Image (tube, rainbow, N blue to C red):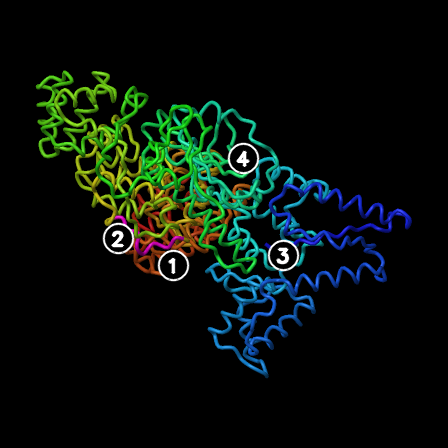
Amino acid sequence: IPKILFVATHKDKVSLENVETRREELYSGIEELFKEHEGKHHLVLRPLIFVNAKDKADPEIEVLKKTITELTFDHPCWGERMPNACVPLELEIAELVAEGKQIMSLVEVKELNDISEVSVLSPEQLTDFLHYQHSLGKIVYFDTPQLRDNVIISPLLMVEVMRSFITDVEFWPKEDKTRKTFKKMSENGMIQKLDLYQIWEQEEFCQILPFKEYIFDMLIHLDIVSEQRRYDTKTGSRLPIEHFFVPCMLTQRNDTDFLTQECTPERTLSLAFVFKGTIIPPALPNRLICACLSMWTLKQYRGRKLMFSGFVGLSVDKEHDIVVCVEGNKILLYLIHKRSKGLIVPEIATSVRECLHLTLERISEFYQSTVHEKVRSQLPFHTEYSCSRFICYFPEERLALKTDECVCKHGDDITLNWKVWNQEQKQKQCDLDCTGLSEDALSQFPNNIELLRLSVNCETRMIHDLALHLEMEETEWSDKVENYPRNTQMVKFLTLIDLRENNGIRFRDLAKGLTEMKLTMHTLCMMRRRKQVMSNIPDDILDSIPTDEILDNISPQIGKMVFQLGTELGLSIADLENIDKCNCDLTAQSKEVLFTWRRDKLVRPTIRVLEQALVNSRKGARCLEEVVKNVDPKTLRAVETVTDRIKDNEDRIIHNIQTSQILDHMMTHLVISADDRLDVEHYPRHDDQNKALLDIVIKRREPAYSVFVDGLRNYGYEDIANDLECVTHDISPSPTLVSAENEGFSAWNVPLYKVRLQKNYVKVITDIQHESIVDHLISREVVSVDDGKKIESGKNTTGKEQEFDGHAFA
């Protein structure tokens, strides 16, 4: 860690005879403040520099310069050999900084290198130069896809960036709107991108504004702000993409009773990442919290988001929640099960632990790299595992040896908890010392997914014998076999469901039945196991919601596994049976299951969830990999944005707009056809017409969405248009509905004359006198007299023109 030099200012406020007394008071106070701090040896308190910053001639200014120079010579990088070829470019950049330039594009840096009259670096040398200068702190350069196109040549710019929105209340702007942004950020840690841009419009930060997108990407890369890309498990709605979290600005501590009411010994496992010092630098847990927010869903508890200073609550799935919080030199992790900690899925616990451990490793490595310190083999933290009362903690090294008896003073064997957190991903059998489900877990009712996994892991004869042993009639079993003659998996699963619903069986009843049948109780342990997914799908696609096309393409490949897949996705038995009755075709059933799952308000409908469900139901994820292999993640995210905007304003659109003129506008711009219009207008009620139009807009993507928004703006719905407006250049057209303007309406096989008519649709219905045209067409026997009368039956002139156009398109 670099040395920190203390300098006292405002010497001009102290009388000359009291300067030395005040100097000693200040530095005595600092020494007292940091006397127990483990970083004390990084502080430079001598010489005791006390300056008048308003007086350039103050002799202590020279003392300050000399001290800084000496500290520079003591830097571990000072004296390292550097290629002479790099010096000219370094001097050129330093000259630009002196002139006031702060950011250069990578292209500009390359051009500056190419025109050098002394030496020109090769591309490899230039890359090494940028990385080395970054490690010295002379520039800021990250070689990542989002950031590698620019170089901050004056790192002081990042100080201004941070100061612009991470600051104490006394430095908040006086202007009301901007001040409200700071107040909101301090209360809930949230800020909108546009609000941050508005902060940068202030005169003192205007130098940031030209590079706002790049700087914002930099803040995300550094985990200073975090985009909430997940779905709230309570409402099912996606948090708006404009909202970002800034944990370091949260000042409110956790004042909920979530830890005492939900993190109970019966339902919770805990571990701690323990750091070597007495405290943890706030930046580290803040970055960890940001990373967590990008991986899991922020949880709501009694109407409040569980995000506070040094504390965050998250939902992993319907059954598992986690809490990450800071206490002293520990980062505590709690994993809470909805019913019992004995039913925690070990693979989930292991995955969460590994994910947070790896994230902390990378954050630690990042901070080491910023001070040009070689990454040490020994991490600055270690892991300890808690007893059930969250009081006693045992270090991982002791537990991993498996030689000591790790029983705490409360009588808890912490080794059992350690095994849940450290499950071997490919392990299929229980350990030799496994004691089976805990007493608390045995008292619980198994849920649908647990019964499904039991049925999958047991042979048909075993389920049959177990069912009869638990007092099911043979005729009931026979009825199920008759109802599903070609699907033994369904027979096994529905048998277990019936035992729970009709006989009220709990885990204890299943365990007792297996024991009396002289079968192993460890069969039940497999009910809380989850298959490992070896995914080849990129994370940015896995974290997105599947589009209609993805669900349409995957549906035909599910086959007979549709019921099992629906159960893994969280659909109720009643929903699945209803889908089975209404759709005889397996593809139609699969499609209905997938679309029902995506609409479910209690499910985060991401591709990752679908992939895990396919693997758990023994279908496998290869079919999904094939479907999404050519999908653009930008398109997925943009489609989600458009869908969210429409959903947020759905009621206003359905109840307030008149569809006719919007349809005219969209037909003229060739984003819907005459047949589409007929499909919309065949509904008698305006609300239903508007719903049908919204379905078309969502499915067609761009350019239909932009044309729809423009139509709203042109025909008097500017407020709705403004709320719907968003950047949609990343949205590709639906592959099944190619833009007619680009493809000559090939998707609809429309003749050229219809295309020309449609391009001029608005002009035709507003500008021409239809009577003479109709008479002419009747005389040429193009339309009949009855057709002419039907056209004349329109309620008004526009209606007549639309009726006329309807015949032209027929």
Q: Picture coordinates of residue 127 (x, y %)?
A: 49, 69
Callout 2, which amino acid? Glu
Q: Residues within 10 Å of mark 2 (few under 14, many from 20)?
A: few
- The answer to whether 332 is drawn above or below residue 11 in the figure is above
Q: CA distance from mark 4 to mark 2?
A: 46 Å
Q: CA distance from mark 3 to mark 1?
A: 37 Å
Q: Which residue is mark 1?
A: 741
Callout 1, which amino acid? Glu
Q: Which residue is mark 2?
A: 626
Q: State the residue at coordinates (49%, 45%).
A: 227
Q: Which residue is mark 4?
A: 327
Q: Is residue 258 magenta?
A: no
74 sits left or right of 720 in the view? right
Which of 745 and 413 lies nearest the eye of the viewer?
Answer: 413
Q: Secondary structure at mark 1?
A: helix
Which residues lie in the magenta part?
A: 624-633
Where the N terminus falls, by quadrant?
bottom right
Give yes or no for contact between labels 2 and 1 (Cβ–Cβ under 8 Å): no
* Res. 778 in view: no
Q: Residues within 10 Å of mark 4 (few under 14, many from 20)?
A: few
Q: Which mark is residue 209?
A: 3
Q: CA distance from mark 2 to mark 3?
A: 42 Å
Callout 3, which amino acid? Leu
Q: CA distance from mark 4 to mark 3?
A: 38 Å
Report the mark closest to the observer, 4 or 1.
4
